[in-house]
């Protein structure tokens, strides 16, 4: 028997339903490890960072938090945000601190229409729709450059400046990532999304880099859209989408639209990648902490479990990633749906079904 591959995970459940869905995702991962006949195993280190930690310590994570998790193989993240802590404090203090601290510059967010999920999109071939958002994850509109001033002038006179940062290096590496990803898919196409008619510096640079890089991929079809027109394209002609690459803000917004069209934000998985693997990558569902349903056991675990599949693929367990995605599809096909998808099944029920269906898809493989 070959030696067991041991993976060390940094697990950050975070806030609200993040704790519930990460617990279920870890239950799936541990089950798969136990059923792997010694092929792989997980060692998990849990970190209690988040809004509760902030209210107690005045910070979202330990001062040396990035250092503490830099040697892990991957990071499994729940959600961040809770009443009493401003959203910009919770986001910049934890999630973005990790993404930027580890230069996780490529964020991928698949849009998949799962069988059995109520249709939000009126399209004749909805079951065949499948595309992926590639989000520049290190600069752009989320660079954190700017400030506030002139508060001393009195009410109504304060000034806030928020700047976007676009570098040629940042644009090129995410665009090349999108082209390389497109080459792995049946249809080889990349769509670039900007707003360069209004943002005449940073996004014109993006357009110019896209045009230059595309010449190195003559086998890949390309097109370019302004972000407002692309939002309409998501609804009117989603069959034209394959790999969509966009800046930090635009891809963030469009991925939420895609997830909503597919049924719910609760089913959307994502990966924050350092493609060079110099630092660990982080895997999380797209949805937030949903404090209104936290603790009720009704959260949808599919997005977080789907993110675990992305993590398995990143760790080289590609067959297991495929099996997990098939188990999720089989579960929704059977009508075992959580509340946000119109079903009556609780968080644990959905996870139990996915675990049960793992055995089924392995048998059929």
Image: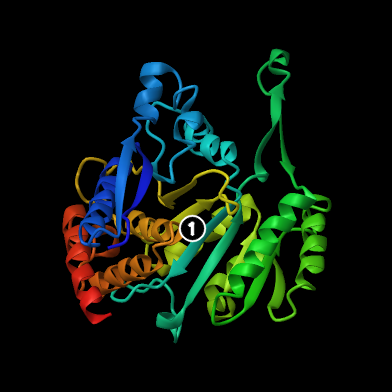
What's the coloring here? Answer: rainbow
* Residue 127 sits in quarter: bottom left
Q: Secondary structure at mark 1?
A: helix
Point 59% across, 68% down: residue? 181
The answer to whether residue 193 is seen in the rendering is: yes
The location of residue 67, given as percent across then percent down, is 50, 29
Q: Is residue 69 above or below residue 365?
A: above
Q: Compared with residue 357, is residue 247 higher up or lower down, i.e. above or below?
A: above
Q: Which residue is at 44% across, 18% downward?
A: 58
- State the image coordinates of residue 135 (x, y, percent, origin top left): 59, 56
Residue 158 visible here? no
Residue 285 shown left or right of residue 24 in the figure: right
Residue that label 1 marks: 256
Q: Hey, which residue is sitting farthest front in the picture?
A: 1
Specify few, some or many for label 1: CA neighbours under 10 Å numbering under 14, 14-19, or 20 or more.
Answer: some
> Where, quadrant-wise, is the N terminus in this rendering?
bottom left
Please name the residue shown 47% across and 32% down the image.
90
Q: Position of residue 77 (x, y in %)?
A: 39, 44
Would you say 325 lies left or right of 297 here?
right
> As drawn, which residue projects farthest toward the bottom?
124
Q: Residue at x 29, y 67 (%)?
A: 328
Quadrant location, the C terminus: bottom left
């Amino acid at each position: 028997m070959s030696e067991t591959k041991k993976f060390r995970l940094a697990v950050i459940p975070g806030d609200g339903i993040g704790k519930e869905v990460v617990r279920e995702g870890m239950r799936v991962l541990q089950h798969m490890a136990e059923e792997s006949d010694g092929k792989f195993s997980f060692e998990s280190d849990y970190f209690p960072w988040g809004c509760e930690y902030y209210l107690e310590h005045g910070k979202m994570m330990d001062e040396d938090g990035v250092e503490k998790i830099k040697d892990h193989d991957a990071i499994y993240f729940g959600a961040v945000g809770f009443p009493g802590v401003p959203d910009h404090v919770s986001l910049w203090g934890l999630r973005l601190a990790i993404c930027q601290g580890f230069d996780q510059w490529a964020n991928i967010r698949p849009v998949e229409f799962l069988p059995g999920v109520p249709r939000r999109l009126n399209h004749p071939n909805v079951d065949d729709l499948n595309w992926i958002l590639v989000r520049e994850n290190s600069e752009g509109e989320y660079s954190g450059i700017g400030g506030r001033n002139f508060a001393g002038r009195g009410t109504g006179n304060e000034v806030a400046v928020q700047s976007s940062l676009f570098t040629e290096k940042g644009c090129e590496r995410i665009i090349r990532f999108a082209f390389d990803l497109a080459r792995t898919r049946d249809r080889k196409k990349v769509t670039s999304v900007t707003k360069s008619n209004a943002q005449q510096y940073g996004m014109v640079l993006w357009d110019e880099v896209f045009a230059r890089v595309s010449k190195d991929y003559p086998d890949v079809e390309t097109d370019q859209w302004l972000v407002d027109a692309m939002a309409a394209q998501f609804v009117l002609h989603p069959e034209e989408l394959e790999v969509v690459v966009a800046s930090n803000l635009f891809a963030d917004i469009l991925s939420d639209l895609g997830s909503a069209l597919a049924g719910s934000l609760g089913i959307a998985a994502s990966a924050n990648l350092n493609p060079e693997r110099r630092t660990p990558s982080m895997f999380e569902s797209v949805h937030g902490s949903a404090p209104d349903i936290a603790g009720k056991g009704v959260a949808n675990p599919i997005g977080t479990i789907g993110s675990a599949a992305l993590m398995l693929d990143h760790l080289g367990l590609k067959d297991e990633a495929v099996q997990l995605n098939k188990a999720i599809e089989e579960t929704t096909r059977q009508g075992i749906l959580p509340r946000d998808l119109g079903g009556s099944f609780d968080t644990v029920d959905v996870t139990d079904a996915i675990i049960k269906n793992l055995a089924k898809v392995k048998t059929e493989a």
